């Protein structure tokens, strides 16, 4: 992302490419919603967000280049402003009571998973696999916190180009989907009860939807524990972005004479504010459901815009290393996450 000031919303709205671009990403997002409600998509655990970026990539490499001059402004607005709005509204999916619901053990597990997986991704990606820092961090954020939503939220802080974001999203979708089917199969082999299994699934599976599927495949008790643990993990997104932004600023200041200006991800702070407001339970459940649906739509539009701006050539240039990094993190989540869960439950559970 550029550090220069962005045009104001009224100025953007007067741009001839603004409304056609917004309509385009809206149509792609709605197509993702429609497909996600089909039986095969529900069985596979494919969300509207995942399908929106897939459709967007398909159009981005066929139809979109010919209409880009007439739609680019709206598409880029969806990839930026609508993304931030979606992350803020994501706060209506969590409450501070979720923290109390899983106890000290759940919080310690999630903190260790987020810190351990992200740091491992950055170190393995840059030092061992010799990947670029942006891709390594994006894959690490998606694996450590909440899949595609975390990748999208980290993009404004890391300032990575669209194709690197798409690569990261693709990897977390692939391995999160595999985990969704693998975990229920592993349950009889883990030697834990339904509640502890749910905490394990919620602390180590990538996407919220995948956690729900993996939990319900065992029992409602497992699903409830999994979702609460996952929501706690999602709540760590905002402090994670603040720490990441501060670390990147410090690193850039020490590696260049002029330094970089302080960048505060205000949308991350607003995410916490919204989660705090949601914790008060002042709004009717129908209103919360409507807000969550709007949030999913905004995030799906952002994913669609990201897909439209992604080109196969850029993804091919990334090579097999991102997939390898994501697979290493997946194994770390399954094996290391299991040991971490057993240890934390024994000491604090």
Image (tube, rainbow, N blue to C red):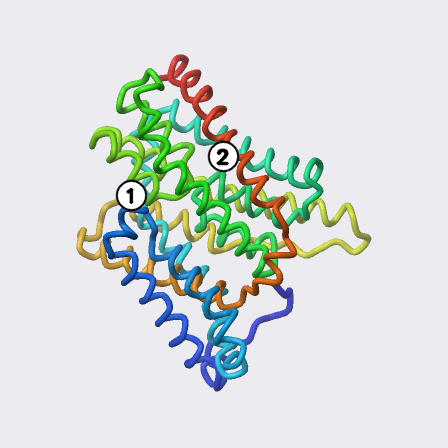
Give the residue number, with chain letter if any, for mark 1.
279
Contact (Cβ within 8 Å) of mark 1 with mark 2: no
Q: Farthest residue to the right: give it.
A: 257
Name the spot of residue 86 as percent of width and height, x first.
Answer: 39, 58
Q: Quadrant of residue 51?
A: bottom left
Q: Is residue 237 above or below residue 107?
A: below
Q: Secondary structure at mark 1?
A: helix
Count of picture labels: 2
Q: Which callout, 1 or 2, points to the residue nearer the camera?
A: 2
Q: Secondary structure at mark 2?
A: helix
Residue 107 is left or right of residue 193, and the answer is: right
Q: Residues within 10 Å of mark 1 (few under 14, many from 20)?
A: some
Give the residue number, with chain letter if any, for mark 2.
330
Name the spot of residue 15 as percent of width and height, x first.
Answer: 50, 84
Residue for point 43% across, 43% down: 146
- Alpha carbon separation for disc pair 1 and 2: 32 Å
Residue 268 vs residue 189, the one in the foreground: 189
Q: Quadrant of residue 183?
A: top left
């Amino acid at each position: 992302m550029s550090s220069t000031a962005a045009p104001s919303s009224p100025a953007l709205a007067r741009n001839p490419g603004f409304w056609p671009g917004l309509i385009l990403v809206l149509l792609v997002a709605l197509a993702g919603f429609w497909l996600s409600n089909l039986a095969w998509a529900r069985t596979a655990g494919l969300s509207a967000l995942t399908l929106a970026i897939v459709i967007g990539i398909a159009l981005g490499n066929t139809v979109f280049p010919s209409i880009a001059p007439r739609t680019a402004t709206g598409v880029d607005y969806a990839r930026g402003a609508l993304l931030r709005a979606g992350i803020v509204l994501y706060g209506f999916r969590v409450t501070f009571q979720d923290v109390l619901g899983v106890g000290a053990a759940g919080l310690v597990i999630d903190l260790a998973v987020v810190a351990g997986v992200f740091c491992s991704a950055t170190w393995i990606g840059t030092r061992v696999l010799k990947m670029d820092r942006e891709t390594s961090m994006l894959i690490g954020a998606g694996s450590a916190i909440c899949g595609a939503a975390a990748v999208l939220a980290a993009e404004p802080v890391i300032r990575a180009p669209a194709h690197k974001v798409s690569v990261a999203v693709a990897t977390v979708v692939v391995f999160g989907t595999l985990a969704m089917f693998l975990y229920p199969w592993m349950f009889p082999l883990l030697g834990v009860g339904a509640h502890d299994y749910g905490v394990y699934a919620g602390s180590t599976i990538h996407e919220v939807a995948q956690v729900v599927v993996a939990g319900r495949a065992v029992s409602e008790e497992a699903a409830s524990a999994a979702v609460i643990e996952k929501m706690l993990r999602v709540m760590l997104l905002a402090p994670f972005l603040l720490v990441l932004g501060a670390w990147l600023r410090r690193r850039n200041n020490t590696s260049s004479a002029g330094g970089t200006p302080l960048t505060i991800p205000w949308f991350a702070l607003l995410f916490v504010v919204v989660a705090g407001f949601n914790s008060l339970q002042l709004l009717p459940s129908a209103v919360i459901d409507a807000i969550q649906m709007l949030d999913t739509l905004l995030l799906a539009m952002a994913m669609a815009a990201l897909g439209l701006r992604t080109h196969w050539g850029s993804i091919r240039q990334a090579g097999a290393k991102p997939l390898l990094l994501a697979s290493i993190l997946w194994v770390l989540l399954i094996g290391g996450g299991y040991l971490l869960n057993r240890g934390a439950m024994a000491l604090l559970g």
